[in-house]
Amino acid sequence: MPSMLIRLGKEDVRVVLRDLGTIMEWSSVTFLAPLVASLFYMEGFRTIAAYILAAGIAFAVGFTLRNAFAPKQETDLKHAFLTAAAFWLLYCAVSALPFVLVQGMSFVDGYFEAMSALTTTGLTLMKFSIDFAPNSLVFWRSFLSWVGGVGIVVLALTGVLTTYSRASKLSYAEGREERIKPNIKNTIKEIWNIYIGLTLVGIVLLYLSDMDLFTAINYSMSAISTTGMDITSQGLVGTYSPWVSLSLIVIMVLGATSFGVHYLVFKKRQFKTLLLDAEFKTLILLGLMAAFMILPKMFLLFGGSLASIEQAFFHTFSAISCGGFSLVTANDVAAWDDFVKLVLIAVMFVGGSAGSTAGGIKISRFIIFVKSIYWRIKEAVLPEKSFFAKKFEGKNLELKQIKEINQFILLWILLLGIGTLVLTLYGNSMADSLFEVVSAQSNAGISTGITNAAMPFGVKIMLIINMWIGRLEIIPILSAIGFMLSLRPSRR
């Protein structure tokens, strides 16, 4: 007779390891992209071998895990949470190998770079060494961010062709709750069709703005995934025309818009959806409000010119979309007025639409949080037995849903506080530390200069954790930790 109810036993671990192996095995295909690029640019045996080795390790680890465990139990949501959290850590470790083998980075630095790209954050330790990196490695960073925009688990599931139950739970655990089609397989296909189409639109826009093709491809992948990684040390600083800035704003906003909205607009030709979608309208409204708030400060910095307007609007939309591109250096950002930093922190914190490539707490949660305050005030002034519907986009919300959203936001703020405390412990200012941590956890990537190759080991680890937490949106990670702590041998 069992002595107690066990939440996670040996059979559960076998389920997790099997699913982890399956996804890892299929993810090895991603290394073909930089391998092809390396062959195209004839970069030499060492570089080519690095991608082959990484692919081989990913496949071998996945194949071993998948075949070593044959559980009878089907995947449950608790398994999916643990699998998603563990997979991101494991895949990042293998994805870091090209940075280590080709660029000579330490493993921790390579892991940071891979995590930043895959979580679509865009913070980088290759600010200056990127100029000496082979084209295939530059492309690998952009490709990682592009894949991470949709989700590496979602990519792997495209090939797995697994059961609806398992695919649905794994996709949900990675933060992909949207359902464009009734079943998960068709939803994933539609997401990829839309994503590839938007990426091609971005390439055309940037190419017409006088970028060369290689640069346009990399910037489009980075912008539509709302990552914001530059491909040179100079990046966008003082190089490109306002047409490039405008094109990037458009691409970042498209990336921060829900795939469900894109499906209705581009596939169903329901063009009014953009004007009716509460998240899209709020995204534009908050971006415009933030831009006008910091515009006077930009006039002081850049004078009464079009450059001031460009700087204000570009950086606010880069922040709220979590696109992460910047038209100035990190040192310039650090020198900005604290008011400007606080405005950008606020919009990075909110982020883009749910079901998009953007980070942050998501606009839908922000709207419901603000409405919950209004509802609470309304309840306080109305008679005790009064009733009114609590709705978001025409759907009734239960009290449980509202509480879960408010708890999520409180947890998000708590983890931001921990990260900020760690960065200030290493001697960084409070404002810059908060900015950097919010940028990391919201997967935005605008930096005040704290993120660099020489920063302390503890800061690197803290920012890696913030990026990982932000991409998986806390709950799967907390659930995975809880399940791990509950692991104990069965007793009969």
Image (tube, grey):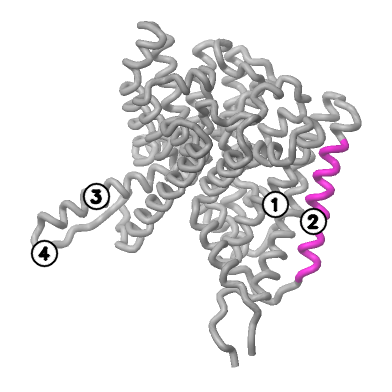
Which residue, as the protein is rendered here, is positioned at the far bottom?
1
Q: Image height check: is 399 above or below 139?
A: below
What type is the residue that disc 3 sits on?
Answer: Ile
Q: Where residue 384 is drawn, which disc sits there?
A: 4
Q: Where residue 61 is drawn, which disc sits there?
A: 2
In terms of sequence position, does the residue under pointer 1 or pointer 3 come before the other?
A: 1
Q: Indicate the quadrant where residue 116 lies.
A: top right
Mark pair 4, 3: CA separation: 17 Å
In terms of sequence position, does the residue under pointer 4 or pointer 2 come before the other?
A: 2
Please tell me which residue is depicted at 35% across the width and 11% down the height of the picture.
299
Mark pair 3, 2: CA separation: 49 Å
Q: Where residue 373 is drawn, which disc sits there?
A: 3
Q: Indicate the quadrant where residue 434 lies.
A: top left
Neighbor class of circle 1 (other Cα within 10 Å; few <14, some 14-19, many 20+) is: some
Q: Image height check: is 181 above or below 98?
A: below
Is mark 1 in CB contact (under 8 Å) with mark 4? no
Q: Where residue 90 is drawn, which disc sits there?
A: 1
Residue range highlighted in magenta = 49-69
Closest to the observer, 44 or 37:
44
**Disc 3 secondary structure class:** helix
Residue 191 visible, this angle: no
Mark pair 2, 1: CA separation: 10 Å
Mark pair 1, 4: CA separation: 53 Å
Please tell me which residue is depicted at 50% across the width and 30% down the height of the picture.
252
